[in-house]
Structures are given as C-alpha cells and as structure tokens.
Amino acid sequence: MQDQINQFLEYLEVEKGYSTNTLAAYQNDLGQFLVFLQRRPADQRPKDWTDVTRDHIISYILEMKEREYASSTIARKVAAVKSFFKFLEEMGQIKTNPANDLETPRAEKHLPATISAEEVDKLLAAPSDSTPAGLRDRAMLELLYATGLRVSELVSLNVNDVDLDEGTVRCMGKGKKERVLPLYDRARAALYKYLEHGRPKLLGEGNNQDALFLNRRGARLTRQGLWLIIKRYVEQVGITENVTPHTLRHSFATHMLRGGADLREVQQMLGHANISTTQIYTQVTDERLREVYDEAHPRA
C-alpha cells in the first residue's frame, strides 16, 4: 500500500510541480492514514486500497476528532485522502472510490494575525547597520514587508533574483509559478547595503554560494533561522502580539488593502491561485473599519 502512496507523491512532484514542503505534508498525512488502517482489528483491516471503505475514512475522521485535532488539520488530512483516492481511481487501481461525495470537514476560518504599521516601523528599524548580520536582517525584514513573500520563498531567493536597477524581485511560488514583485525605495536601499557591505563578509573568501540571504557560516539561511531572528527583534522592540515570519505577509496584505489596493492586485502579489484565499484579508480591514466607526461616530 505504501507503493501506491509513493506513486502518488511522485505524480504530485513531477506532474503537479508541488513544493518539497507540500509533498512532505502529503506524505505525513497519508502515512498517518495508512498507520490508522494497519491498526484496525484483523477483521476490519484492509489488505490493499481496494478494500478501504467509506466507513474506514469516517472512523479515521472520528478518531482525529476524539484526539482533539484542530478542524483545519482534520480538513487538510481528509483532503489529502480524497486526492489520493481520486488518483487511484484515475489510474484504474480502484474501481470504486470510497471518498466520493465525502464531505470534507469545514475548517474554522481564523483571521490572519497582523501588526500595525507603527509596529512594523519599529520592527524594521531594530536591526543594526553596523554589522553584516544586522544589514542582512534589515534587508530581510524590509523585503518581507515590501513584497508579502512567503518564508519559503524568501529563503529560496538567489542573488540574481533581485534587480535593484528595476526595483524588483523575482520569486518562484507554489506550483512553480513565477512572479515579479516591486520594491519600495527603503527596501531597495536596505538590499543594496546588504549586498555591498553585509553579504560579502558573511560569504567569506572562496565561497560561491548563490543564496541571497546567508547565515554566519556562509550557507543559505533556513526558515528556522529566519524565525529565530524575527523572534529576537520582536522581543527587542517590545511587541506583545505573537509575531511569526508569516505575520509580515499578513500585515503587508492588510495594509495594502486598507491603503486602497485592488483585491486582484494583492492576490497577484501574494501568489494566491484563488481570490477567495485573498478575501480573508478584507475581513480584517472590515473589522478595522468597524473599530474606526465605533470610535468616531457620535451615535455609535
């Protein structure tokens, strides 16, 4: 049964162009489902995927609910199972799809966490200009807020992805879709200082690393490394909200919409395949509008 999962993962990688992180999530979710099936009593344990029934999947969902999994996690895992059985059906490996017409548990929609423009200013001003690491950190934070890049997209950037003359950065998003994003002047200036005075010292002599952002060993900075850097500056400037690298992406989108940007334009900049994903940010701006209304209107 694991062989079919491996075939599905290969299909997602080669045919769909899914990222390493997405593939890892599918592998984890389907692996968990397989373990669940293998733990069934002998008379309920399927010998192969053709033996899996709708009741197996429903039992799996109920077990996750009993273990108090978040609704969003359950929804993702069930979606992975449904995609897998659809693949098996299309490949002719099963005649009946047990996941057909199975309703995916609805994930609770949480509004994205953001910080104010004033807090963003504090955070972006925190890194020092006197050290290579400080120049790197300032450039990273400015770039995150200037573009709304995902963390994985930021750490995957190479030097030649940045065009300071044009004031743009090119990134490869989900599904290997490329987009070119504009940079405001402060972000361009921060990147210029880093590339001229910070990166060469982090890189060291004889190192031909292409990565734009480097750690102290001259290797590509990781997502975990970026998270620790941001966490340190958040504590330094006294921001009490829970701030993650993704918070700057959320704040970018929310502030753009509040400033009058078109929803379709923000969708394009964020690299969302579906505009419904972007629309959640309008709820944040609507909430802010309500706050302003309640504070300002004499009869509110």
Image (cartoon, rainbow, N blue to C red):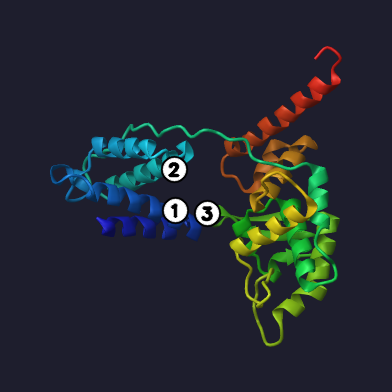
**Is residue 19 at least partly visible in the picture?**
no
Question: Is disc 3 in contact with disc 2, using a CB cutoff of under 8 Å?
Answer: no
Residue 246, given in percent of the width and then of the height, sits at 64, 50
Of the two numbered discs 2 and 1 on the same chain, state the one appearing first in sequence: 1
Query: Could you tell whether 79 is left or right of 285 in the image?
Result: left
Which quarter of the rendering shows the N terminus?
bottom left
What residue is disc 3 on?
175
Residue drawn at (80%, 55%), measured in percent from left and top?
A: 124
Amino acid type shown at disc 2:
Arg
Q: Earlier in the sequence, mark 1 or mark 3?
A: 1
The answer to whether residue 234 is left or right of residue 221 is right
Q: CA distance from mark 3 to mark 2?
A: 18 Å
Q: In this picture, is 101 found above or below 5? A: above
Q: Specify which label sits upstream in the sequence, 3 or 2.
A: 2
Q: Which residue is mark 1?
A: 25
Q: Is residue 47 left or right of residue 234?
A: left
Label 3 Cα neighbours within 10 Å, binned few <14 / some 14-19 / many ≥20: some
Q: Label 1 crowding class (10 Å Cα cut-off): few <14, some 14-19, many 20+?
A: some
> What kind of residue is marked 3?
Gly
Q: Amino acid at mark 1?
A: Ala
Q: Which residue has dot 2 on it?
A: 76
Which one is nearer the viewer's eye here, 23 or 168? 23
Residue 119 visible at all:
yes
**Spatial distance from mark 2 to mark 1, Cα to Cα?**
9 Å
